[in-house]
Amino acid sequence: MKKHINIIIFIILAVIQIAIPVQMVIVRENILNKGKLYKIQVRPVDPYDIFRGRYVAINIEGFDYNNIPVHKRNLLKEGTEFYAILGINKNGYAYIKDISIDKPDEEYLLMENDLNNRIKNPFDRFYMNQEIAPEAEKLYQEYSRDSINHDSKTYITVRIKEGKGTIEDLYINDKPFYQMINNLKEEDK
Amino acid sequence: MSKKNILWLYGELPKLVAKGVFSADTSNKIQDYYGNIEKKDFGQLILTIFATIGAVLIGLGIILLFAFNWDKLERSIKVLLAFLPLVISQIIVLFVLLKKKESPVWRESSSVFLTATVGASIALISQIYNIPGNFGDFLLAWILLIVPLTYLLDSNIVSLLYLIGITSWSGYAQAEGEQSLLFWFLLAILIPKLIIKYRENKYSNISVYLSWTLAICLTISIGITLEKVLPGLWIIIYSSFFTVLYITGFLWFNEAPSIIQKPFHTIGSLGIIILGFILTYNWPWRGIGWHNIRYDERFDHYAAVGDYIITIGIILLLLFLIIYSFKKKELNVLFFGIFPFIVLIGYLLVSSYFDKDYKLNSSEEEVSIIIHLLLNAYLLFIGIFTIIFGTKNRKILLTNGGTLIISVLICLRFVFVEEFFENLKFRGIIFVLIGVCFIVANVFIAKRIKRSEK
């Protein structure tokens, strides 16, 4: 009898063990399929020389403390979650137009102010194969610097739905990073 | 008698019977009296260790194989692959539950494999969707998903991993400014397991590993989970905590043959002595007490209630243990048991006499002199007591330990001195007086030894 109970409990546990990652997949797939597409301009990451290995660290433009209207800055305390209302600038990139503590009617992204009063970046990493990650990182740093001066178009595309966002792809000089790296490899040959 | 001695005795019995020292009947009676001693099965242990390492390597290898060509795969295939090891390991565990329940090798290795794959699948999904990492949340989900294995499969390695996991989690949670009081509930999940293991055999390898890990994790986590609103509360909590550990070890785990098998005892007494040395300096006493309560926004005053509950809880536990030792007539525990009360007196004195910015006026200086004299005298006393106890019971390690305590104390008071101990005249007189005491005591002891030899 005890054996049966143990097996039943284990099966329930196994289902939960699968359900948690499945739920993560469902939430993200839902965002990727039904979310609204935004382009977010990126900028170089500091410090540059740290080898991260499995992902490219991303720094985004237009989502800083400076973008928040001055009279609303006092709303942000250490650790506050807030709704960032998104606008699109003349180059087509998303930025924080306004913030709100209550749920707004317009398109928004759920963001958080951390304990050091810095706004947490919800799109801080882009995972890839460790063989190409260092190369992609180099390209990222190079082109994102130009991108700030509008010499290149280097950005991430994200899908946002009900405040949650997911990175879709990384574009370097207006091309998907994977294509860019393949081009480089072919040139080497 | 220790296991080793009983095993030796059992080895001798057949010889003694053969030589007619006593009958086979007596030999059986002796065996009945000491009971069955299971011999340590090293073969089994090695099998368990190798199988566990093997399981971990296979799990990691599978992940590496996926990483090969990972970028070229469709997202849906990546997601399926992320679940594959998890499902395989779950099937293996199910098989073990059905067919191999009796084999510790199968139980340990399959549950460690499942532990690895649960973590791997969550991590892989986070990578596929570039989910920003909050390591604390990840760790919490992971340990909660695997802790049932400690009961379902009676897995000891998972219990150890769980203890380490909840301790690391409490560290991350506190660093992120979240509540880490949940640690105590997470710990409570494992308590029945510990009780089961101690009832089976509290000196078995597994019980000893669990006790060491538990004692070390608690020592770390108590400090981490405190909200630290009332400054200096850690002094009371840690002194009581180490004493509770020590008394627990003394009352319930005292028959173990070596200090390696007495983790509570060892960590408790080491903790008391080291903390004692630290408290003979001024810095821990500076800016403590209720005049200095922190009103800063960063400190959560509701969470501070947790601190007070921990403090009261640990003091009640301490009082209970001391009363219990009185009832059991184990008065030796009081030599260490008195430490938190000395500290408590110090804390209350400092809190009520010192004002906010600790400038020594005359009454404050007197109070600090009283505390420092008290603590130094206590450490000296502990050192002497340990030496005497060690010599009486022929425990060289204790004798040496006691000598070490006194030597460290002398060094600290001679070299690394501060405040009123800097007074050379005063220090000189104390050193000479204590030195004379030692010589006089020696003369008396030597006389007694001579007399008893006659």
Image (tube, grey):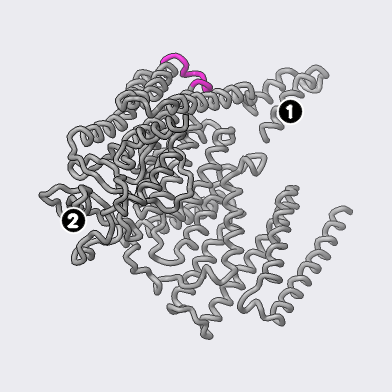
The kind of secondary structure element at disc 1 is: helix
Marks 1 & 2, CB-CB < 8 Å contact: no
Say which mark, if any, is on residue A97: 2
Q: For this view, does B420 lie left or right of residue B414?
A: left
Q: Which residues are magenta?
A: B98-106
Which kind of residue does numbered mark 1 sit on?
Trp
- The residue closer to the viewer here, B212 or A65, is A65
Q: Relative to B400, is A140 on the left or the right?
A: left
Q: In this rendering, would B374 be left or right of B151?
A: right
Q: Position of residue B129 (x, y in %)?
A: 31, 35
Q: Chain of mark 2?
A: A
Q: Residue B160: x, y in percent?
A: 50, 37
| Residue B136 visible in this rendered orientation of the protein | no
Name the quarter where the N terminus of chain A is drawn: top left
Residue at 17% x, 34% y is A34
| Residue lying farthest to the left in this orientation | A105
Question: Which structural element holds mark 2?
Answer: strand
